[in-house]
Image: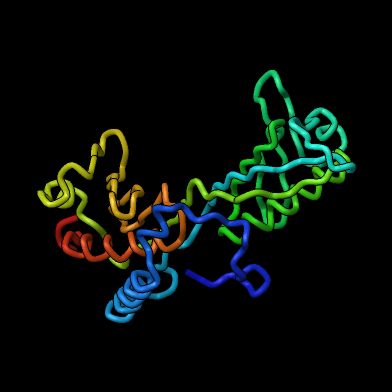
Amino acid sequence: MPPENNQTSKKSKHIKKNKTDVHEYTEEKKKEIEKEYQQIKKSNQLHESYEPKIQNVVSTVILKMKTKTGEDIDKLDLDNLAHTSQNCEYKKSRFPALIQRIKEPKSTALIFEAGKMVITGTKGQNEAEEAANKFKKQIEKNNRITIQIGDIQTSNIVANSQLPYEVNLMKIHDDRSLQGSISYDRSAFPGLIYKMQNPKLAALIFYSGKIVFTGAKNDIQIRDAYCQLFNILKKHQQDKGNK
């Protein structure tokens, strides 16, 4: 995946790693995945356009709120925030959170009165932290309070990639080694759904060779899944004379 710029490439103290991620991916394992990924790129002469690219990161942030005098605050005044902030929507009768948007990084926050904030639309975990800090400053300014950001928990990463060949979905569906992990009904949905267990995520695979990954918790999981799928799907390429 393309590296993020220097300002956002530093690891954040706020970004929380799931315990399962730590156990699944030791430094040695990460090196193995990277080595395999580079070998796939080299042996198949893959252009960067085929690499997995993150399209959306969903993150959950807990805001620790205090008054200017240091007293704990249990609830945000969302009505006040809605009237004093730009680019926001709040209709409590329809949805319990205030919806606010910023342009850079392009993202949307669902802000709940208890101090929970869900951020969507960012293209990476560092962008998610940058967005969280911008939303935090706006809340502080318009509510005259101080906020400390707790852990930023990544709940879902969506990414897509493209294989350099078309895929025979029926062959994959009939592959006995994959039974129990896949579902395919082209009358209902044009893609095959492959539920991976390690890493635990889902891959939507299309005839064109497009893959959409969903359910990942970090970018290493996506790269790992891509390496595994590339090797599996290469065996099930669509015959050029039998489309």
Q: Residue at x 34, y 63 (%)?
A: 224
- Image coords of residue 158 (percent x, y): 46, 51
Give the vertical position of 18 relative to 34 (above or below).
Answer: above
- Image coords of residue 27 (percent x, y): 40, 71
**3 sits left or right of 170 in the view:** right
**232 sits left or right of 133 in the view:** left
Marks counted in the figure total 0
Q: Residue at x 63, y 72 (%)?
A: 5
Q: Nearer the viewer, residue 218 or 242?
A: 218
Quarter holding residue 140 = top right
State the quadrant of the C terminus: bottom left
Q: Nearer the viewer, residue 189 or 66?
A: 66
- Image coords of residue 198 (percent x, y): 29, 54
**130 sits left or right of 210 in the view:** right
Q: Residue at x 32, y 81 (%)?
A: 42
Quarter holding residue 84 = top right
Q: Which residue is outermost to the top?
A: 93
Q: Residue at x 58, y 57 (%)?
A: 15
Q: Nearer the viewer, residue 93 or 237?
A: 93
Examine the rendering and report whether any part of residue 142 can be seen: no
- Image coords of residue 94 (percent x, y): 66, 21
Examine the rendering and report whether any part of residue 95 can be seen: yes
Quarter holding residue 39 = bottom left
